[in-house]
Image: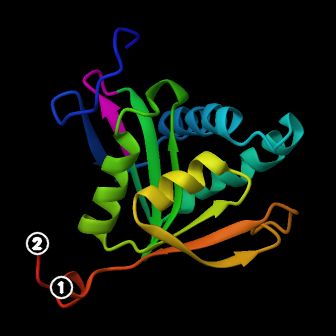
Amino acid sequence: MNKEKESFSEQRMRIVTATERPPSLTKALLDIWEASVTATHHFLSSDNIQSIKPVVATALEAIPLLAYAVDADNMPLGFMGIDGKKIEMLFIGPEHRGLGLGRLFIHHAVTGLGAQYVDVNEENVQGTAFYQHMGFQVCKRSEHDSQGNPFPILHMKMEIPPEHASGQGP
């Protein structure tokens, strides 16, 4: 995929909801997570990443809704986990960033699944900017992440326009 950067289209990729989570899928998604975090979370050391990795592996097994994008060859490109109305995880393989896949995941989460919330590491400037660009706004800040580590978290919410909240579509 090193030709030109092209936007994703339904012909080239699709989002799949994981009904089963075999070890091979978990490993592929964990590899995407590690590559993505290494590329974007510059505030984390290699040791931090390795210590968080088992938590992510467990989360991939436990998250109520796990969706992942695959290419024409069924190779995973990125994934998203949702619990209720909250996007708990969204990671794109570094080689697939900037092509619109994150936007497709957010659209799927918000319009198809009713997601309104997301947390992002404050020091993940690219992630914060992406969510703000997608319409999320910071509503709260925590000094520590969910494991108690000193990595500030921004809690964000997407404001749903009144015409959408009342059930009327665009």
Name the image quarter holding the N terminus. Answer: top left
Near-viewer residue (153 or 48): 153
Number of residues whose C-alpha sits closer than 10 Å to that of mark 1, classed few (under 14), some (14–19) or many (20 or more): few
Name the residue rendered at 52%, 44% in the picture: 91
Q: Alpha-carbon distance for marks 2 and 1?
A: 8 Å
**Observer able to see residue 17:** no
Q: Is residue 27 magenta?
A: no
The dot on residue 95 is none
Indicate the position of residue 33 as horizontal and vertical percent values.
Answer: 60, 40
Looking at the image, residue 18 lies above or below residue 32:
below
Name the residue rendered at 29%, 23% in the picture: 6
Looking at the image, residue 13 lies above or below residue 73:
below
Amino acid at dot 1 = Glu
- Is 161 positioned to the left or the right of 152 in the image? left
Indicate the position of residue 16 as horizontal and vertical percent values.
Answer: 29, 46
Near-viewer residue (67 or 45): 45
Indicate the position of residue 36 as horizontal and vertical percent values.
Answer: 60, 36
- Is 168 positioned to the left or the right of 124 in the image? left
Near-viewer residue (87 or 142): 142
Name the residue rendered at 32%, 80% in the picture: 160
Q: Are marks 2 and 1 in contact (CB under 8 Å)?
A: yes
Number of residues whose C-alpha sits closer than 10 Å to that of mark 2, classed few (under 14), some (14–19) or many (20 or more): few
Q: Secondary structure at mark 1?
A: helix
Q: Which residue is mark 2?
A: 170
The dot on residue 163 is 1
Name the image quarter holding the C terminus. Answer: bottom left
Amino acid at dot 2 = Pro
Q: Secondary structure at mark 2?
A: loop
Q: Which residues are magenta?
A: 68-74
* Total number of numbered discs in the rendering: 2
Near-viewer residue (67 or 99): 99
Name the residue rendered at 18%, 36% in the picture: 10
